[in-house]
Image: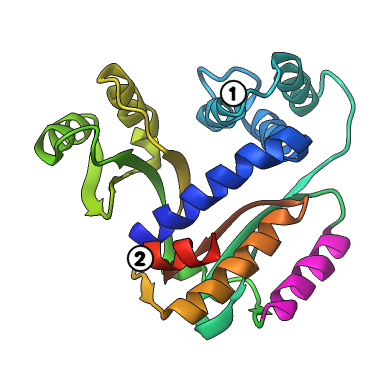
Amino acid sequence: MSGHSHWATIKHKKGAIDAKRGKLFSKLSRAIIIAARHGGGDPETNLKLRYAIDKAREVSMPKDNIERAVKRGTGETEGITFEEITYEGYGPGGVAILVDVLTDNRNRTNSEVRKIFERHGGKMGSAGNVGFLFERKGTFSIDAGAVDEDTLMGIVLDAGAEDLRRSGNTFDIICDPGAFNKVREALQKNNLTPSVAEISQVPKAPRDIDVEVGRKVMRLMESLDDHDDVQNIYSDANITEAMVAEVE
């Protein structure tokens, strides 16, 4: 999962900057609206909503914003109707890319996302092109200096995690989405704060790429992430710390 976790770290740093502009709040509000629409407004029984609210709280999204988004999702207040779509395509070097969007205008978003792919040397494909290369998992990254591997393994495996791997300066934890909250609670109980904690699409077989291709892939992913309708981007590229350092 190392390549995934390095991109996730960039995304979280970028998210802190986006939050100051209010841009991230808009994206998080959409996620809350969709979750509440499909599963109801109670985060105790709607795990997707709980996850969306927790992500909003992590970046200090105001409580009023969260409550308004929940009410819009449950139909208590009127608002724009959003549609969930996942686009699939290829980036530089043949890297597989998945893009989750929430849009109120499918045609506009389709056209704009396609142009971003093409501008960065990629190509948007049809449904099913690359989705089979990924699997939905809960992922966490913990600073390797905060805990030793054996201790951490005992904590997360008891909570239902599937795997723990060392990746540079972090430990990457993978779990079934259904175990996500239990693993997070176990980490919190042991005073361990993950730098990454999300439910995402993890590549089944990460693809090794060179630094130049890695730089181009991250530029594509950053451009996609800047689009207002884009919620998440995933790739099967094994993005290394060296690639991250060069881009930063």
Q: Dot 2, how many residues are within 10 Å of its Cα: few (below 14), some (14-19), or many (20+)? A: few
Residue 116 vs residue 92: left or right? right
Residue 152 vs residue 111: left or right? left
Q: In which quarter of the image is residue 30?
A: top right
> Dot 2: what SS?
loop
Q: Can residue 106 be seen in this view?
A: yes
Residue type marked 1: Arg
**For residue 109: magenta?**
yes
Q: Provide the major secondary structure of the magenta segment.
A: helix
Residue 155 x %, y %: 18, 29
Quadrant, the N terminus:
bottom left
Residue 235 lies, with reference to residue 56, above or below; the image says: below
**For residue 185: magenta?**
no
Q: Is residue 85 visible?
A: no
As drawn, the label of residue 57 is 1
Residue 160 x %, y %: 24, 35
Magenta range is 106-120
Residue 32 lies, with reference to residue 120, above or below; the image says: above
Residue 231 vs residue 237: left or right? right
Task: Report the residue at 58% width, 78% height from top.
Answer: 90
Residue 88 lies, with reference to residue 199, above or below; the image says: below
